[in-house]
Amino acid sequence: MFLIDTHAHIYLEDFADDLDQVISRAKLAGVDRIYLPNIDEKTLPDLNALVSKHPSLFKPMIGLHPTSVKDNYREVFNELFDGTDLTSYCAIGEIGIDLYWDKTHVREQTEIFERQIEMAKDNHLPVVIHARDSFKEIFEVVDRQNNSELTGIFHCFTGTIDDARHILKYGGFKLGIGGIVTFKNGGLDKILTDIDPENIVLETDAPYLAPTPNRGKRNESAYIRDVAIRVAEIYGKSLEEISAITTENALKIFEG
Ligand SMILES: [Zn+2]
């Protein structure tokens, strides 16, 4: 059985003390591959260093996260992308609009989000989208940009069934399902029963949003198993079946 964690920030300092154990626990849990979404120009060197240490397990993304878009966003953007060979990355992520923490830079966030979508299309790369309190703003951009070239994941999906349908209508997108699916009153179970499992991929978003029974603690890729078990339960399928389906879905996005 192989599981793919499509979204984990294992290069962050949260894992510096026990990285080897985190990796061996992930492998024991059946995790075969972990995709690393970037945050900004400061996190990229650590992300790249982790990938070069374990190139078959970790796969790198490059992107500017919306919460790192401030007044100096053009400089930051150039520092991140200037002279970068995009062919060594498997996706542009994570990118998007986040209006939960701060609405001050919504215009700048939208500009950078759209620019990164265009780069992804130009380079035949998928996008990994972070949406928080911002489906309306995100949909405006993706409605405008969507074509047969655009594919990707709406990571940590927590929208309504209408939001899910809007995303799946684009044609090239999957929903990233993480720890929230294991939370009582998380509400994702009702949405999943209305959509086919071929539309989802699994993720942890480690170190954030650990699934039950580790809710509130540091999250890590091994816990993807708890997400997979709950998703299997919702669909009335075996863990092996859900692993196979979601692994295939993830490879379809990242490997084309
Ligand atoms: Zn993330």
Image (tube, helix red, strand yellow):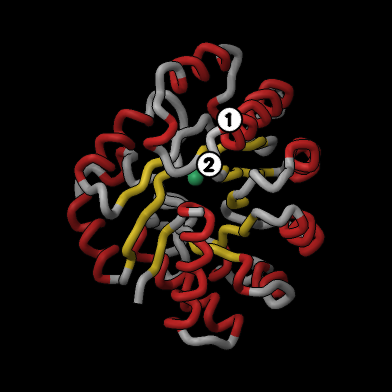
Q: Which residue carries the number 2 mark? A: 125
Labels 1 & 2 near each other (Cβ < 8 A): yes
Q: Residue at x 42, y 82 (%)?
A: 240
Q: Is residue 16 above or below residue 156?
A: above
Q: Is mark 2 within 8 Å of ligand 1?
A: no
- Mark 1: which amino acid? Met
| Quarter of image, res 218 | bottom left
**Amino acid type assigned to the residue bearing label 2 in the image:** Leu
| Residue at 36% in and 59% down | 221
Q: Nearer the viewer, residue 62 or 97?
A: 62
Label 1 sits on a secondary structure element that is: helix
- Would you identify the image quadrant in which residue 144 lies? top right
Q: Left or right: 84 with respect to 155? A: left
Query: Is residue 27 positioned above or below 51 on the image?
Result: below
Q: Is residue 211 left or right of residue 218?
A: right
Q: Which residue is mark 1?
A: 119
Residue at 51% over, 38% down: 92
Q: Residues within 10 Å of mark 1 (few under 14, many from 20)?
A: some
State the image coordinates of residue 123 (x, y, percent, origin top left).
53, 34
Q: Quadrant of residue 51?
A: top left
Q: Is residue 90 above or below residue 238?
A: above
- Few, some or many residues within 10 Å of mark 2 (<14, 14–19, 20+): many
